Amino acid sequence: MPDDAASKAKNYGFATRLSHAGRPGTHVHGFVNPAVHRGSTVLFPDCQARKDGAKHRFEQYMTYGTQGGPTHYAFENVIAEIEGGTRSLIVGTGLAAVAVPLLAYLKAGDHCLMPDSAYGPARNLCEGLLKGWGITTTFYDPCINEAGIAALIRPNTKVVYTESPGSHTFEVQDVPAIARAAHARGAKVLMDNTWGIHHFRPFEKGVDVSIQALTKYVGGHSDVLLGSVTVNNDADWQVVRGAASQLGQYASPDDVWLGLRGVRTMLVRLKRQEASGLEVARWLETRSEVKQVLHPALPSHPQHALFRRDFTGACSLFGVVFQPRYTVEDVARFVDSLALFGIGASWGGYESLAILTTGNVTRTAGTGEFGGPMARIHVGLEEPADLIADLGQALARLG
Ligand SMILES: *Cc1c(COP(=O)(O)O)cnc(C)c1O
């Protein structure tokens, strides 16, 4: 019987578990998928049952809508499966999934280490609200080694944040080395694992809390925003769940249902997009207009060896550095000339996207410069030959 318990009980392959996790079996009239359970109030048969229920607030036990319901729990089980953790928490956006653990583990007087290549809005939170609350952040070179990060950890450093590869510039971090240094000094390791998705196993690499923008490949259709926070033990669960509860974090069950629908086909989309992305990236590498393609799965990538060691595959988001003879305006004209690539933020949907990176990214630790103007490409499910032809005609207009 395809259901959540059966999928956990056996040592099935990942694709099998992904199609069985979070399913109700025949419990709900036999329909294959969990229902959308909308609700604020949860009723109890009597006062004692309600009192007993309150003791289980952070379990999969419903006492009020903000604690989530059956649709949320089904999705949480699927995401925990993907990340290889014990429990996942679903929140309304990927950015909320960044904010909840930062707020959970940091308090006034604490220090946070954040890679210079972190997702921009995560940087904004550190330099905005957290700073105002007396929490300081040091931005570090994402390619730092174990001794380097150890030297930056202070007695009050409570969080070492990682994101690998980095947003826009795709530096692959040595997460196991960073985690060793952090744990030796009592700091928690948080990781934004959105790019790695199931290709990077965060808890096997020393991460304590893994963050996903489910908006990307899990949603997969550019029609829903969702995020997840996954942990690997009960103590961390109590901390992140407690913070999310205090903050009133929640996701709409309709959106969660879309996430559940998207995730069932994620592996086939990812596999196709990984292959198409590499085909496009390899083609771009052969072009004289291009100085460097920033794709961790290409042997030319500066941290390709780390990628090979720690990742089992790639997604379809990468960077392109143009020759220094081109201006940012030239690259903007290239992006504007594309017919099949939408100009817009986000990624992981079925459609291709391109944006200008240079001028849109903040760095304060001196990283992220590759000697030419840059763009970011997301490859969707279109025919790679059509995408390559489109890129070719746009390159011809570079100048
Ligand atoms: C998009 C993104 C997020 C935030 O996700 P939203 O759902 O858009 O809030 C977080 N981290 C990374 C790396 C992202 O690309």
Image (cartoon, rainbow, N blue to C red):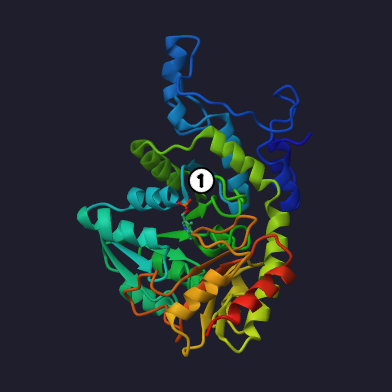
Q: Nearer the viewer, residue 166 or 25?
A: 166
Q: Nearer the viewer, residue 208 or 302?
A: 302
- Position of the N terminus, as image quadrant, is top right
Placement of 270 over or under 376, stated as above or below? above
Where in the figure is residue 58, as x and y percent of width and height? 45, 34
Placement of 179 over or under 69, stated as above or below? below
Where in the figure is residue 108, as x and y percent of width and height? 22, 53
Where in the figure is residue 172, as x and y percent of width and height? 52, 73
Q: Nearer the viewer, residue 86 or 114?
A: 114
Q: Quadrant of residue 109?
A: bottom left
Task: Look at 65% across and 55% down and name the residue there.
Answer: 350
Can I make out residue 152 in this image?
yes
Crowdedness near tag 1: few (<14), some (14–19) or many (≥20) residues, C-alpha within 10 Å: many
Please indicate whether residue 338 sits to the left or right of residue 158 in the image. right
Task: Look at 44% across and 24% down and name the residue there.
Answer: 64
Q: Nearer the viewer, residue 132 or 387?
A: 387
In the image, farthest residue toward the right: 1
Residue at the disc numbered 1? 226
- Determine if the C-beta at disc 1 is less than 8 A from ligand 1: yes
In the image, farthest residue toward the top: 46
For the residue labelled by badge 1, is the local secondary structure a helix, a strand or a loop? Answer: loop
Can I make out residue 172 in this image?
no
The amino acid marked with disc number 1 is: Leu
Task: Look at 42% across and 40% down and name the residue there.
Answer: 241
Where in the figure is residue 399, as x and y percent of width and height? 52, 85
